[in-house]
Image: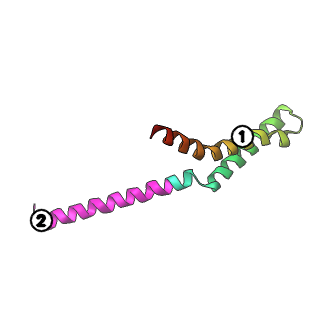
């Protein structure tokens, strides 16, 4: 294989790796975004409120705040927990 062909192959591989890294970084940004967290909390609230309404829970709209708020708080505490865990391992 000529040097020029090898160089082109390496450049193509580097471009593919950069593309993959960009996709991974974008996915990570989505997973940790406030938009995603609030969306999941909102869907959790809506579904829970509907189920509570179906089963006849009084104040279902207020009661549905409990699991949605618990989800939000748990997700917000995970970065701090991760930092603690990583520091403990180091």
Determine whether the residue tagged by mark 1 lies in a helix, strand or loop. helix
Mark in the foreground, 2 or 1: 1
How far across and how far down the image is residue 57, in percent? 86, 33
Q: Which mark is drawn over residue 3?
A: 2
Residue on which disc 1 sits: 70
Image side of residue 10 versus residue 56, left or right: left
Image side of residue 48 versus residue 78, left or right: right
Q: CA distance from mark 2 to mark 1?
A: 59 Å
Image side of residue 75 versus residue 3, left or right: right
Q: Quadrant of the C terminus?
A: top left
Image side of residue 81 versus residue 47, left or right: left
Residue at image location 69% in from the left, 44% down from the top = 73
Residue at image location 62% in from the left, 52% down from the top = 36
How far across and how far down the image is residue 42, in percent? 72, 49
Residue furthest to the bottom in view is 4
Frontmost residue, 88 versus 11: 88
Residues in magenta, as a range: 1-27
Q: Characterize the magenta stretch by its predominant secondary structure.
A: helix
Determine whether the residue tagged by mark 2 lies in a helix, strand or loop. helix
Residue at image location 25% in from the left, 64% down from the top = 11
- Within 10 angstroms of label 1, few (less than 14), some, or many (20 or more) residues? few
Which of disc 1 and disc 2 is earlier in sequence? 2
52 lies above or below 41: above
Residue 68 forms part of the magenta stretch: no
Residue at image location 10% in from the left, 64% down from the top = 2
55 lies above or below 15: above
């Amino acid at each position: 294989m000529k040097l020029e062909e090898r160089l082109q192959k390496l450049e193509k591989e580097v471009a593919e790796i950069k593309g993959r890294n960009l996709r991974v970084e974008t996915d990570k940004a989505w997973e940790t975004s406030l938009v995603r967290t609030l969306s999941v909390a909102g869907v959790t609230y809506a579904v829970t409120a509907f189920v509570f309404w179906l089963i006849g829970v009084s104040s279902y709209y207020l009661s549905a705040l409990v699991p949605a708020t618990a989800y939000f708080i748990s997700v917000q505490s995970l970065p701090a927990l991760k930092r603690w865990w990583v520091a403990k391992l180091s």
